[in-house]
Image (cartoon, rainbow, N blue to C red):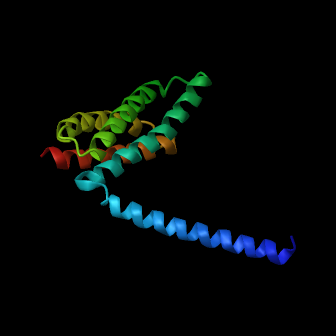
Amino acid sequence: MDRREALQGVVALTAVAAAANASAQQEQHHHHHGGGKYAALMETAGDCVKTGETCLTHCHDSLATGDKSLGQCAKRVSELMAACSALRSLAAQNSRFVPQYARLTMQVCDACEKECRKHASKHESCNACAESCAACSKECKALTT
């Protein structure tokens, strides 16, 4: 096989891959309609899980060095991640339990935010987690009032 044949093969494969990708995007767009009525809640709950993972890792690293000052923060973040993961899943399903579960998750977010704010000036991961908690709590409150 010479270079010309190899290049033609690469071009052909690229064209096939691009066509398949375009087809998949159209199909995906057809079946999904922006996350449903709980799209914003899914986003904020997902952000809480993401920032919570970073914060929890930081807490664990600090605890591993003997610094126990982030122990309560680690507990609140663990609760947050569990609550927000479940809320996000229920929201994705448009579950009838979302409003009730959002009330509980709002309390978990508020408790985590309160604990993370104690460390926010020293630890960026705590600050980011606190901000995500505040946003999710606000979104939960909008559903429950």
Q: Does 36 sit above or below residue 2?
A: above
Q: Nearer the viewer, residue 100 or 110?
A: 100
Residue at the limit of the structure toward the bottom, as seen here: 4
Residue at the limit of the structure toward the right, as seen here: 2
Is residue 113 something that shows in the picture?
Answer: no
What residue sits 35% from the left and 51% below the top? 43
Relative placement, left or right, of 87 versus 96 is right
What residue sits 44% from the left and 47% below the top? 128
Relative placement, left or right, of 138 versus 130 is left
Q: Nearer the viewer, residue 57 or 9?
A: 9
What residue sits 25% from the left and 49% below the top? 139
Q: Nearer the viewer, residue 11 or 104?
A: 11
| Residue 87 image offset from top left, x and y in percent | 30, 39
Relative placement, left or right, of 113 versus 104 is right
| Residue 88 image offset from top left, x and y in percent | 33, 42
| Residue 115 image offset from top left, x and y in percent | 38, 33
Q: Residue 106 sits in which quadrant?
A: top left
Residue at the limit of the structure toward the left, as seen here: 145
Which quadrant would the N terminus be assigned to in this image?
Answer: bottom right
What residue sits 30% from the left and 60% below the top? 33
Q: Does 43 sit above or below residue 108?
A: below
Residue at the limit of the structure toward the front, as seen here: 1
Is residue 28 something that shows in the picture?
Answer: yes
| Count of numbered circles in the view | 0
| Residue 72 image offset from top left, x and y in percent | 42, 25
